[in-house]
Image: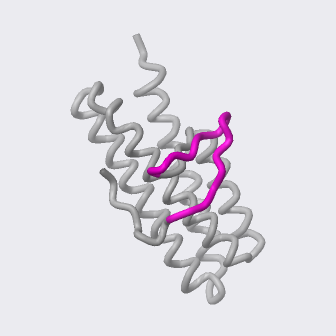
Amino acid sequence: MTEVPARCQYHHVGRPDRGRLTGDGLHLHHEALLTVARKIQAAADDGDAQRLEQAADLFVDALATHVDDEAGAMTKLSPAEARILRRGQVRLLAFATELIREATHGCSESPRRCVNRTEEVLALLTLQAKDERLALHDPVA
């Protein structure tokens, strides 16, 4: 299981086309995670620290659940492929968790830093989602 900050708990209603809410978290697909990441970026661009923190919290929680959801599929990959994807997931979670810390403590002092971090998170997620789709859902024959 992926370690998730204890403060990431939500009351969110999942939409069937975007994910689902169960007792163990919000289950989002790649496109829905990208949508949440874009909302984080919009909040940072607007300088809205509260909205940024809430969206980042939601993102980390949903991303951790997503990573857990994909753990079973990872076992079907070669050890090298699985290791590469897991490293990307861990890195993405670390960047997103750092964004929560920055949103909580530093965005008002350095808004550009939060904007930069949100851009990094979105870029990493875009690459990770592509890699996961190719490896887990569209394997090359």
Does the magenta-highlighted stretch encompass residue 85? no
Choose between 2 and 120: the one closer to the eye: 2
Dominant secondary structure (helix, strand or loop) of the stretch shown in magenta: loop
Residue shown at the point (61%, 60%) measured from the top left: 11
Residue shown at the point (50%, 59%) measured from the top left: 60
Q: Position of residue 2 (x, y in %)?
A: 33, 54
Choose between 106 and 27: the one closer to the eye: 27
Check the image and name the residue furthest to the bottom: 109
Report the side of 78 relative to 108 (left or right).
left
Q: Position of residue 100 (x, y in %)?
A: 52, 72
* Residue 107 in the image: above or below residue 12: below
Q: Which picture quadrant has residue 32?
A: top right
Does the magenta-highlighted stretch encompass residue 23? yes
Q: Which picture quadrant has residue 131?
A: top left
Q: Which quarter of the figure is the C terminus placed in?
A: top left
Residue shown at the point (70%, 58%) measured from the top left: 39
Q: Which residues are magenta?
A: 9-24
